Amino acid sequence: MPHLVDASITATFNQEDNFLSSISSIKYLQLYLLDPPWWCNTVTYSRLIECCISNFDPEWCESLVVFLSNCPKLKVFRVDSIDRSENHVPVLWNQPTSVPECLSYCLEFFRWTKYAGREDEKQLIWYIVQNSKCLKRAKIWLKSTCNLEEKRKMTKELKSLPKVLTSASIPDPPARWKNIV
């Protein structure tokens, strides 16, 4: 599908599925994850400039960095994480030694929604923001069920990062993302 420009996908993928390879030339992608992104290292999205990943589990941090490594022209990146129970034990990830090309040369806008302040989320967000050399703005939407004290703490931590805005000052997403959870 070399002429496909925009896709919104909700699916379960198996390891023999070549569907994602067939859309590797896409420019705009909305992906709603139903299972762990084992496939993230199998496809290079050489033309992808905007991506929204919904239903993301912060336990998949390493997979997300691999995915970013396969998106060299990515300029706009949005992650909508899932709500985890309060008993969730964060999975600490090993920060990669190399930085994805899109972070070094292209990523301008980054947005994370349903941020709960968990250590795994925090590490990934800090990694993306600190390694994005062209980043103009990062916007973090806090999880709506956090209490006021948690929100204050998270806002203070996030404001220590350059170019980060918290949910109080965030405009609506682009029109193509209006229907994403």
Image (cartoon, rainbow, N blue to C red):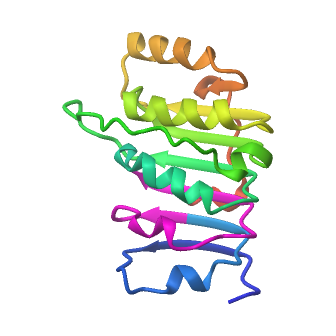
Confirm whether residue 139 shows in the render. Answer: yes
- Residue 41 is inside the magenta segment: yes
Q: Is residue 104 above or below residue 21?
A: above
Residue 130 image offset from top left, x and y in percent: 65, 30
Residue 12 located left or right of residue 129: left
Q: Is residue 91 above or below residue 48?
A: above
Residue furthest to the bottom in view is 1
Residue 90 image offset from top left, x and y in percent: 29, 34
- Magenta residues, start to end: 31-56
- Residue 10 is inside the magenta segment: no
Quadrant the N terminus occupies? bottom right
Q: Quadrant of residue 51?
A: bottom right
Residue 4 image offset from top left, x and y in percent: 72, 83
What residue lies at 19% left-to-right and 31% top-to-bottom? 87
Residue 166 image offset from top left, x and y in percent: 61, 25
Q: Is residue 68 above or below residue 10?
A: above
What residue lies at 57% left-to-right and 60% top-to-bottom? 179
What residue lies at 67% left-to-right and 25% top-to-bottom? 164
